[in-house]
Image: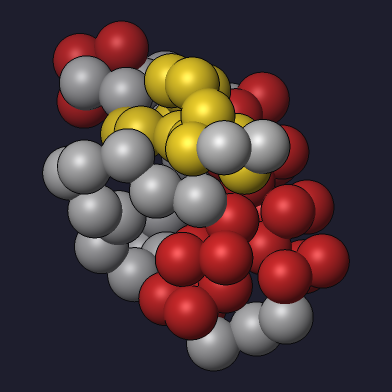
């Protein structure tokens, strides 16, 4: 979690995530998938055909440090 930049409070796309991470869109899509599987972000709809994500509330995130 410490290597990730602060995620926006409003819904964001993988293109916006790519800009935050300073990487290409393909890597941002893979990162979004991993963050979704970890319960850090969740899908919230679409903007046109583009999927949007938002941060999950901190109390629902369960990332272990071991």
Up the image or down, 19 lies above or below 57; here it is below
Q: Which residue lies furthest to the bottom in this view?
A: 22
Q: Which residue is drawn at 39% across and 48% down?
A: 12
Tell me if 10 is positioned left or right of 43 in this view: left
Instruction: Tell me how the rendering is colored.
Output: secondary structure
User: Is any part of residue 39 visible from this angle?
Assistant: no
Up the image or down, 45 lies above or below 19; here it is above
User: Is any part of residue 21 visible from this angle?
Assistant: yes
Q: Where is residue 17 in the image (x, y as percent from the top left)?
A: 50, 64
Dividing the picture into quadrants, the one containing residue 38 is top right
Q: Residue at x 24, y 53 (%)?
A: 8
Q: Residue furthest top?
A: 60
Position of the N terminus by quadrant = bottom left
Dividing the picture into quadrants, the one containing residue 44 is top left
56 and 24: which one is in front?
24
Q: Where is residue 55 in the image (x, y as percent from the top left)?
A: 32, 34
Tell me if 22 is positioned left or right of 40 in this view: right
Q: Which residue is drawn at 54% across and 87% down?
A: 22
Tell me if 7 is positioned left or right of 9 in this view: right
Up the image or down, 49 lies above or below 25; here it is above
Dividing the picture into quadrants, the one containing residue 11 is top left
Tell me if 48 is positioned left or right of 61 in this view: right
Q: Residue at x 22, y 21 (%)?
A: 57
Position of the C terminus by quadrant = top right
Looking at the image, how many numbered discs can be counted on the residues? 0
Up the image or down, 10 lies above or below 29; here it is above
Q: Where is residue 18 in the image (x, y as percent from the top left)?
A: 57, 72
42 and 16: which one is in front?
16
């Amino acid at each position: 979690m410490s290597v990730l930049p602060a995620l926006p409070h409003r819904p964001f796309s993988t293109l916006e995530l790519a800009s935050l991470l300073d990487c290409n869109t393909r890597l941002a899509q893979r990162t979004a998938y991993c963050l979704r599987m970890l319960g850090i972000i969740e899908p919230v709809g679409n903007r046109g055909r583009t999927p949007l994500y938002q941060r999950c509330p901190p109390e629902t995130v369960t990332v272990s440090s071991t």
